[in-house]
Image: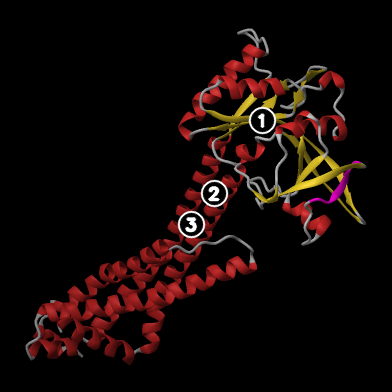
Amino acid sequence: MYVLASVRIALRALRVNKLRSALTMLGIIIGVGAVIAMVAVGTGAAARIEEQIASIGSNLLMVLPGTATSGGMRMGFGSTMTLTEDDARAIAAEIPGVVAASGSMRGVAQLVFGNQNWSTAIQGTAPDYLVIRDWDLAAGKFFAPEDLDGATKVAVLGQTVRESLFGEGDPIGQIIRIKKVPFTVIGLLSRKGQSTWGQDQDDVVLIPLSTAKKRVLGVSQANARFVGVIQIKVASPDLLQDVQQQAIDLLRQRHRLQPYQDNDFDVRNLAETFAAQAESSRTMTLLLGAIASVSLLVGGIGIMNIMLVSVTERTREIGLRMAVGARSRDILGQFLVEAVTLALIGGILGILIGVGASVLIATLARWSTLITPTSIAVAFGSSALIGIFFGYFPAHKAAFLDPIEALRYE
């Protein structure tokens, strides 16, 4: 009852000075709204990165071919062909913890279906590719080992390619031409979306590696066994470092490299790269939240200033209440409840504005935002704590006024 009475008195006092109360809450409203909106932007970015990481495939190692030197100039990785299909098979067979390893080659070609055409990435790969990339089929089937052995002219389309050539139609069983070579569409991949570097992963056609080499990408007979990259699926994240080192040792042995010679390949742990990106995103979220929290501090200072003014204006009222029996704790509770009420009302309005701002940012700026219950609870709780912290000093000052001096105050 004491608390409810204090709340009623506090609300009555705030209604008397509506404009001043509204201006006092403005700092809290802006602070809470800014915290929710900024954290939503940062959390949305982190969630987007995690989605993109998941779309690449979990527990994945990439082996890139080595560098070439020409005229004293060192080219980048992939400038010479040093990896073979046999390397991929050896990695899968000889290294414990490897679920699958597959070599692949990539190129760009023009696709034609009826009067529609589309230029896209052509990926020649093995039947284990979907397992390695954690990729599902939306329709149809994937090519089998016998398709790889027989260089069968079959293709599996990404969603972007399907939409470009067939619209919303069913591509399964249709004949498309890749570099004028007819291919039968046997499968349709599920949607993956963009990768972390902005590449549309659905803009691709998967065909057997042997078919890609013989009929599409034009690999010479001398380079018939070479591949452009080897992808390795590892059973557990805990095994990534160990498998990476074993893959390096195995490939050095297979390529007959001497201890003094550099690797003619590069094994990359994508988990480390993605973890660094995710950590950067989390740091950005904390930074945005910390910057926005400064406005909460400013709002708290505003509450303290206005409450000090209110104590001064209501000195005679305080003296009268004390004269008729009000105790110091009653006065302390009244002014503290007023400060907390201001902060909480401002917090509620700030939550509404923060949610609205997050939706507006996502709509107009097309940024990923994610509003979490935790951010709302933290922002609202912070507003209550600010009301208590910054309201205590004015309330304490009011509670310990001398009643006689208060009654004399003009």
Q: Which residue is mark 1?
A: 102
Residue 50: which disc?
A: 2
Q: Quadrant of residue 379?
A: bottom left
CA gap, disc 1 and disc 3: 42 Å
Boundaries of the magenta span: 173-179
Verify CB contact (< 8 Å) between mark 3 and mark 2.
Answer: no
At a point 57% along the width and 49% down the height, the residue shown is 49
Whether residue 262 sits left or right of residue 165 in the image: it is: left
Between marks 1 and 3 in the image, the one whose residue lies nearer the viewer: 1
Residue 234 drawn above or below residue 154: above
> Tag 3: residue type?
Leu
**For marks 3 and 2 on the same chain, the one whose residue lies earlier in the sequence:** 2
Q: Which residue is mark 3?
A: 288
Q: Are marks 1 and 3 in contact (CB under 8 Å)?
A: no
Q: Are marks 1 and 2 in contact (CB under 8 Å)?
A: no
Residue closest to the eye, 402 or 38: 38
User: Is residue 249 rendered to the left or right of residue 66?
Assistant: left
Please say if 36 is above or below 257. Answer: below
Dot 3, how many residues are within 10 Å of its Cα: few (below 14), some (14-19), or many (20+)? many
Q: CA distance from mark 1 to mark 2?
A: 24 Å
Q: Is residue 18 left or right of residue 317?
A: right
Which residue is drawn at the image coordinates 41% and 81% (left, top)?
23
